[in-house]
Image (tube, rainbow, N blue to C red):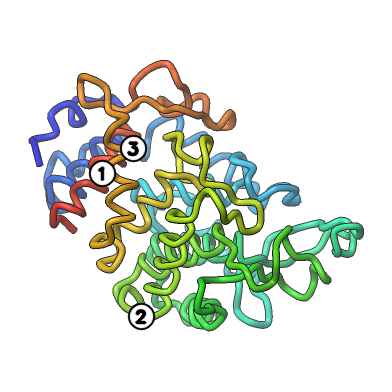
Amino acid sequence: MKNQDDLLQCQDPWVRYRTLQDLLGRPQEDPAVLDARAGMLQHPLVRSLLDELATWPGTVISSHKSAGQLYHKLAFLADIGMNVHDDGLNGILARIIAHLSPEGLPQLPMNIPQHFGGTGQDQWAWALCDTPLQLYILNKMGLSQEKPVQNGIDYLTGLVRDNGWPCVVSKELGSFRGPGRKADPCPYATLLMLKLLLSQEETRQIPAVRQGAASLLDLWQASQEQHPYQFYMGTDFRKLKAPFIWYDLLHVAEILSQSDFARADQRFLAMLDLINSKAGQNGLFTPESEWKAWNAWEFGQKKQPSFWLTFLVRRINFRVAGGK
């Protein structure tokens, strides 16, 4: 792994912070790390996200793919290294824990129309395409030892099948189920469950992780024939984009790269070869697709190389090369 000078010279402090921590192994008390983190916490874009998140949980969910949903924005703050002790986050995380289902799962306000099997009413509910991400956020932000968090993880882990996780929603959403066969895995739910389970040491090696990783690798291998719940792995899937919102190549590779089992699989290495082939002459990566809700960020465009996107790719390669 080279010295990462290009990333360390980036103006965006979250790029420098995560590069120092994840690629160079600098300790939290290192002056450069402290400086980058302080800059991150005061950055106008980060402050803007915190202002938005103060309205948690935000509007009723109409699409889990909407990159502007507050839980996606909170997940990004977790990914760059913010935690429960940072200004404004403790109250937001407390509000998540305040709305738990009887199973101990974080809920969000939703409205599923009757013609899709829902009630047509605004109500608090959970789905396997959102509640694992909320548990991931709580875990990453320092609440992993809270009993409700571990209870929720245990409950969701128990829903795994031989081919990954299915489409599952809370009873409040009626008979709603995504557009697929009941026996199929939901690729996005499986991805989020792996993201959650790989985020803590206690569950990184459990059988469910291998089952979920194998499911995603099988889907990649059969990407021309199998499209469960209308999740395709075609042209759009293979475009590089950030931040991690939906089911796409970089998001899948990011999660699989954290699994010892997946890192050794030739199908994962084929994914990584495809990603690496997209590097520019300067070794930087340019987004090939964008989320409009993130167009104020340097990765939210398709015209220039992105240091954050480049960092994400390099971290995957770092793990494969034997880094943590």
Q: Is residue 152 left or right of residue 221?
A: right
Q: Nearer the viewer, residue 307 or 161?
A: 161
| Secondary element at image label 2 | loop
**Mark 2 or mark 3, which has the lower sequence index?**
3
**On the rendered structure, is 39 left or right of 35?**
right
Residue type highlighted by circle 2: Ile
- Amino acid under label 3? Met
- Binning the other alpha carbons within 10 Å of mark 1 as few (below 14), some (14 to 19) or many (20 upward) gives many
How far apart marks 2 and 3 lie (CA) works out to: 35 Å
Q: Is residue 95 left or right of residue 235?
A: right
Disc 3: which residue: 40
Secondary structure of the residue carrying tag 3 is: helix
Furthest residue toward front = 225
The residue positioned 43% from the left and 55% from the top of the image is 221
Disc 1 designates what residue? 18
Residue at figure coordinates x 28%, y 36% from the top left: 15
Q: Position of residue 264 (x, y in %)?
A: 23, 62
- How far apart are labels 1 and 2 at the CA level? 27 Å
The x and y percentages for residue 226 are 57, 56
x 14%, y 34%: residue: 4
- Which mark is on residue 206? 2
